[in-house]
Image (cartoon, helix red, strand yellow):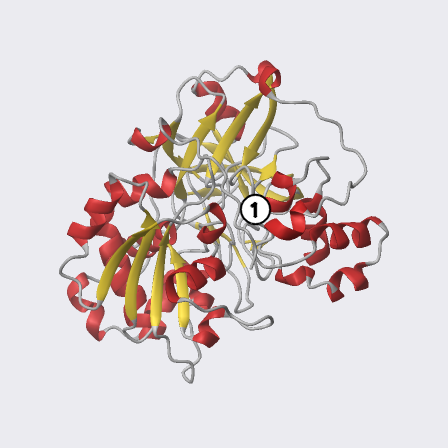
């Protein structure tokens, strides 16, 4: 059994800050691909006028999720921009804001009273057309995740409110401020999964969220709120399943095959917005934390350049050593601050030059810390060495695909080897 490493949290200020609506960007840089699955193709061209919520990119393949315009305005160019989801430049649609805030017609939606009699395929279509993907970081199309084969009975729905990343508090604020909407979203997911037992899982340290959740879900049938003592790594779906239900999913299998679905709270909030309000996924809550004047949580339009957010929040860009999006352990250090917010940007964490230790990377000292710390019992340094040598076949034989990309191996490495990065490369 791996020794689950405790990673200190830096959340005291951000977790107490209510969600603030960030202004719409002057130019939205909307990446056409922010999801796992098929590559989207633009459905608009340069010179087109678009409205808020209008679909602007889509794919014909089943495993896909469309992209919608976050603002109204004119498409001024379509060219590559840095994509933090893939750590490389990919296609983006640039939209100049006309400040008219013209909205597209809402998606097909239903009332809460209609939920019981709505066909599952219709609910899945709404979720798909809203462009909803896993907002906890994975980015897999939610309509596919919730379309469980008929022969697979789901016994448990785990609603993931652990938010293990040490600087992130966006999910925590959603649980505090949008609890009633989470109840609506859970009802949709429960119906799609055949009415399983629901466990709302969060950390006991989320002292403001826990009573809110307990009150909101107290009248929901076969539902419990479980505030547990969870480590950072147990925010991962597979690790949470083991911590809460006591069993692991065998290598090569998915959690639904074991009767469990884990769904992040931000995703469930987006599901409720789509199904009952007809809102596509064009904005998300993201945490601004680290070396910033005021840590906070922002409701920000997807496509907003990170630089705009930092400048508006009095962050001195010249003092920064790095900016990491999507969590300091599982996220990506930006190559440019012109990079836009994506559906998967759970946080923006800033690190100042004068506070970053410049420890040099040296050769492995064979301490074994990465091996003992790996929550899924891999040998990170062995996979790292295989990648350095270009032997990806060997990396595969070392079960690189079972890595949960938690970053713990890099965190504990005393010589700062890029273990997590290289294991992730082997997995890709």
- Looking at the rendered image, the quarter that the N terminus falls into is bottom right
x 23%, y 57%: residue: 184
Q: Is residue 275 left or right of residue 262?
A: left
Is residue 405 positioned above or below 342 on the image? below
Foreground residue, 4 or 312?
4
Foreground residue, 158 or 45?
158
Residue reaching furthest to the right? 389
Is residue 1 positioned above or below 252 on the image? above
- Looking at the rendered image, the quarter that the C terminus falls into is bottom right
Q: Is residue 348 left or right of residue 115?
A: right
The image quadrant of residue 253 is: bottom right
x 49%, y 61%: residue: 238
Is residue 326 positioned above or below 17 on the image? below
x 43%, y 20%: residue: 313
Percent coordinates x, y for residue 235 in the rendering: 45, 51
Residue reaching furthest to the bottom? 151
The image quadrant of residue 127 is: bottom left
Residue 263 in sight: yes
Percent coordinates x, y for residue 307 in the rendering: 53, 25
Foreground residue, 245 or 427?
245
Residue 79 in sight: no
Q: Which residue is mark 1?
A: 45
Circle 1 residues within 10 Å: few <14, some 14–19, many ≥20: some
């Amino acid at each position: 059994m791996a020794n689950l490493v405790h990673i200190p949290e830096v959340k005291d200020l951000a977790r107490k800050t209510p969600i603030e609506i960030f202004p719409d960007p002057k130019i939205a840089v909307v990446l056409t691909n922010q999801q796992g699955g098929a590559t989207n193709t633009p459905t608009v061209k340069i010179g087109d006028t678009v409205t808020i919520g209008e679909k602007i990119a889509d794919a014909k393949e089943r495993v896909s999720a469309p992209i919608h315009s976050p603002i109204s305005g004119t498409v001024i160019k379509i060219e590559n921009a840095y994509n933090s989801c893939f750590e490389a430049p990919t296609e983006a649609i640039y939209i100049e804001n006309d400040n008219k805030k013209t909205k597209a017609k809402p998606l097909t939606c239903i009332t809460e009273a209609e939920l019981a009699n709505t066909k599952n395929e219709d609910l899945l279509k709404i979720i798909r057309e809203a462009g909803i993907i896993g907002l906890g970081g994975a980015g897999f199309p939610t309509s596919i995740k919730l379309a469980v084969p008929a022969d697979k009975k789901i016994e448990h729905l785990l609603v993931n409110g652990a938010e293990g990343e040490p600087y992130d508090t966006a999910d925590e604020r959603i649980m505090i401020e949008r609890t009633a909407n989470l109840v609506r979203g859970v009802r949709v997911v429960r119906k799609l999964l055949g009415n399983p037992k629901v466990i709302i899982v969060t950390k006991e340290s989320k002292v403001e969220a826990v009573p809110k959740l307990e009150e909101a879900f107290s009248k929901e049938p076969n539902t419990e709120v479980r505030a547990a003592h969870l480590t950072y790594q147990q925010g991962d779906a597979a690790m949470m399943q083991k911590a809460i239900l006591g069993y692991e999913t065998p290598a090569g299998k998915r959690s639904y095959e074991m009767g469990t679905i884990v769904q992040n709270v931000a995703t469930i909030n987006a599901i409720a917005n789509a199904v009952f309000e007809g809102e596509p996924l064009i904005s998300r809550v993201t945490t601004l934390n680290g070396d910033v004047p005021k840590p906070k949580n922002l409701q920000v339009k997807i496509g907003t350049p990170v630089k705009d957010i930092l400048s508006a929040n009095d962050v001195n860009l010249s003092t920064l050593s790095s900016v990491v999006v999507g969590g300091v352990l599982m996220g990506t250090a930006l190559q440019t601050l012109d990079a836009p917010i994506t559906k998967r940007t759970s946080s923006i964490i800033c690190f100042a030059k004068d506070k970053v230790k410049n420890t040099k990377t040296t050769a492995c000292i064979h301490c074994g810390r990465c091996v003992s710390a790996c929550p899924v019992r891999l040998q990170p340094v062995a996979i790292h060495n295989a990648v350095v040598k270009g032997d990806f076949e060997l990396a595969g034989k070392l079960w690189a695909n079972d890595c949960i990309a938690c970053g713990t191996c890099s965190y504990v490495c005393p010589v700062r080897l890029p273990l997590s990065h290289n294991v992730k490369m082997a997995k890709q």
